[in-house]
Amino acid sequence: MSKKLISVVLLLATPVALGDHAPTIISGDRPLIRGNSPGASVAGGTVQSNLAQPDFSLSATPSFQSTTPGNSASYGMNIAPLAATTGFYSNVELSVTGLPPGGTATFTPNAIQASGSSTLSVATSSTTPVGNYTLTVTATTGRITHVTQVTLVVSDFSISVTPPSRSIGQGSRACFAVSIKPVGSLMATINFAVTGLPPGTHSAFTPASVNNSGTSTLTILSQKSSPIGTYVLKIHCRGAGVTHSADATLTIK
């Protein structure tokens, strides 16, 4: 019986693929030859290979971020070819759903070629409600889709001043209690400042800042020369990229 020489050509994505995943030529259940290099001649049979479909993984770092209304948070999105596959070189497009009301998102870049990283930036508006939001990030190329989820926590704080007004004589002092209360799971240092003081007066906050929540005492010391009159003080509290203000009235008589 005469023998015929046939050629088997495997179209692989990379030259390394044949060395890493050697195909086997079989006839029925009996291997005829195992390919160890390109161009191997075989007597006959069918091709059997353990080459897997090219694929990739998607991961996010970190998976949890917090921000305040009107500010933003960022995540690193990472694309990597799976080690068990060969020849992944596709363009992977990124998208996100589950944004909070008033929120917007951008990917930089918005697509990744084969492997790399993109920064997901989520910006909130000043009217974004406090709460915990689960964002779903989707990475797609062709028929392959992978998803991962990250958490965005939006928190805030409120400010109150007691009493709302004080009356003192020239050369006397007045005290106001400024209280900070977190709204949501706020984790921030809040700093205090005051504007609108009468001429010739001095002020101090004790303490000058609070962590997350607490009360600071604003003390105002007038001089004998401080002008008589009624003054509207503006008390400012700033932390986590947010500033809230409250008014208090000081009368010097």
Image: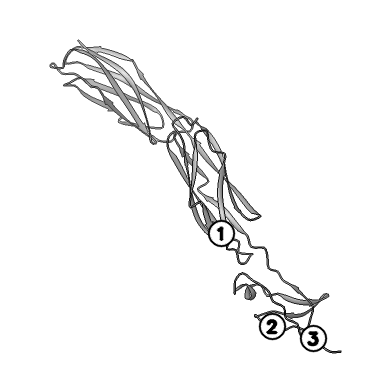
Q: Secondary structure at mark 1?
A: strand
Q: Which residue is mark 3?
A: 4
Question: Taking 53 as reference, is 246 above or below it?
Answer: above
Q: Is residue 179 left or right of residue 94?
A: left
Along the polypeptide, which appears first: circle 1 or circle 3? 3
Q: Which residue occupies the extreme right position in the image?
A: 1
Q: Which mark is residue 40?
A: 2
Q: Amino acid at mark 2?
A: Ala
Question: Taking 103 as reference, is 34 above or below it?
Answer: below
Spatial CA span between label 1 and label 3: 44 Å
Along the polypeptide, which appears first: circle 2 or circle 1? 2
Q: Amino acid at mark 1?
A: Ala
Q: Amino acid at mark 3?
A: Lys
Q: Which residue is mark 1?
A: 80
Residue 178 falls in image quadrant: top left
In-front residue for pair 97/57: 97
Q: Which mark is residue 60?
A: none
Spatial CA span between label 2 and label 1: 32 Å
Q: Point out residue 174 in the picture as x, y percentages from the top left corner.
A: 25, 17
